[in-house]
Each structure stands twice: as structure tokens, then as C-alpha cells.
Image (cartoon, grey):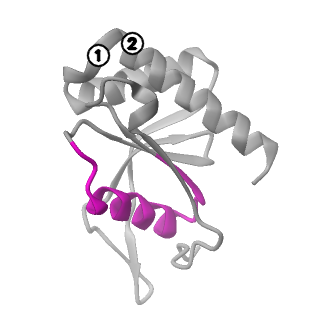
Amino acid sequence: MSPVDDALTEEIIGGGIEVHKFLGPGALESSYENCLAFELGLRGLEVQRQVYLPLRYKGFDIDAGYRIDLIVEGQVIVEVKAVEHLHPICTAQLLTYMKLSGISVGLLCNCHVELMKDGIRRLELKDPVFRREP
């Protein structure tokens, strides 16, 4: 992992902590997502929200309903959750987005926790095997 990736993920995590300090653990998932996108923009980061991600199948783009919550600087996927406990399906969802998009770094942020640092998981793929065809 490059130092740029470390610095970027640290900045995103810092933004998540800032948003969580303001909203606390009981808000809607969409509130956290919107505020985090806004906070990261205030920090000078490029943020894309609700990014459509087609499934490439036999040379065709299939609309499988995939929407990435946030892509930051084109380098990190952020999946925002507000659930009591993160289940393996949450991790699987983020890994699928990472594989399909070719973005190798992802943050899974569960905001339904007392301390935000306890709700963040960083994932990294060494080889996104399902990279999208051009």
C-alpha cells in the first residue's frame, strides 16, 4: 500500500469520526452518507455519491442494482452502514464492489456504534479478480 493510500484512508476515517461526533449513533444511514460526503468535500477531497456499478457479463453491462455509496478520489470505496452488528454479508458486499470496480481499497463504516473507531473496517484487495472490462 502506498503512503498516499494510507493518508487518504486516514482522512476519510477522520471525516467519519467528525460526522459521528455530530450525529451520534442513532441517525439514518443516508444521513451519515450525505454528511460524510459533505465533510470530505470540505476537506478538499473529490467524492462521488451513489455510483452506478454495472455487472459485466459476457461482454454486456447488466444492471444488477449495484450502487456504491461513496468513491473518494477515485481510489477508495466507502460503504456506509447503520446497523446493530456488521454481518459477513456487509463485508461481502464491499468486496464485490471492490472486485467489480477494480478499486482495491475499501472502508466499511458502521455508524451505529458508540465510538466510530469501533465501527470501521479497512479492506484491501491484492488482486481485484473481477475488474471491469473497458
Toward which corner of the image does residue 31 lie, by quadrant? top left
Residue sitting at x 34%, y 30%: 33
Where in the figure is residue 70, as x and y percent of width and height? 44, 41
Where in the figure is residue 45, as x and y percent of width and height? 62, 27
Residue 24 is marked as 1
Image quadrant in which the C terminus is located = bottom right
Q: Which residues are magenta?
A: 85-107
Image quadrant in which the N terminus is located = bottom right
Reply above or below: 67 against 18.
Answer: below
* Residue that carries the numbered disc 2 in the rendered image: 21
Residue sitting at x 40%, y 57%: 94
For label 2, the SS is helix
Within-10-Å neighbours for mark 1: few <14, some 14–19, many 20+: some
Reply above or below: 112 against 101.
Answer: above
Q: CA distance from mark 2 to mark 1?
A: 6 Å
Q: Amino acid at mark 2?
A: Lys
Q: Amino acid at mark 1?
A: Gly
Reply above or below: 44 against 129.
Answer: above
Q: Is residue 4 part of the magenta span, yes or no? A: no
Main secondary structure found in the magenta portion: helix
Residue sitting at x 59%, y 66%: 125
Within-10-Å neighbours for mark 2: few <14, some 14–19, many 20+: few
